[in-house]
Image (cartoon, helix red, strand yellow):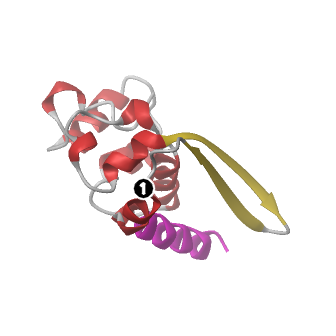
Amino acid sequence: MHHDIGVGELGKTGHAERSYEMAKQYTSDERILNAIRYHSEGHPSAYGYILTLADKLDICCPRLTKLGKTIAGVRQLEHLLKRDFYIIDQALFINFTSDQKLNLQELNEYYFIKKFLSQLKILLNILT
């Protein structure tokens, strides 16, 4: 089950609540359901932060909509082909493989990078 299951044809507006309602058929775990329900508004729990980070790390071309391919920064996700994650000496490394069309400057200016890093710091503070 994907936490954005409620996007569908109706789009992003209200998708978190629709996703929450649809997720009830797959789980009754309130921690997971609330993470889905509030993932676009805030993250009241470690589950919410984990969900946000997983969502941001799952960036790749198949998830882009037609509209997404027209938005600066977002459109660069189309060029990310593969992601690898590993931990060395308690440091998280994330490697992206891209095609030759990636505009790295545009991707770095996209809010995703800043949001991901801020969410990761908050989660680490919660877990430690």
Instruction: Specify whether residue 105 is painted magenta.
Output: no
The answer to whether residue 118 is above or below residue 55 is below
Quadrant the C terminus occupies = bottom right
Position of residue 27 measured from the top left corner of the image (x, y, whole percent)? 45, 30
Can you tell which quarter of the image residue 115 is in? Answer: bottom left
Can the viewer see residue 34 in this picture?
A: no
Q: Residue at x 27, y 41 (%)?
A: 69
Region rendered in magenta: 113-128
In the rendered structure, which amino acid carries the disc numbered 1?
Asn
Position of residue 17 measured from the top left corner of the image (x, y, whole percent)? 22, 41
In this view, the residue in front, 27 or 61, is 61
Residue 89 as seen in the image, left or right of residue 49 = right
Position of residue 76 measured from the top left corner of the image (x, y, whole percent)? 39, 49
Residue 55 as seen in the image, left or right of residue 66 = right
Count neighbours of disc 1 (C-alpha within 10 A) and say few if under 14, some if 14 to 19, many if 20 or more: some
Task: Give the labeled residue for mark 1.
Answer: 103
Position of residue 96 measured from the top left corner of the image (x, y, whole percent)? 60, 49
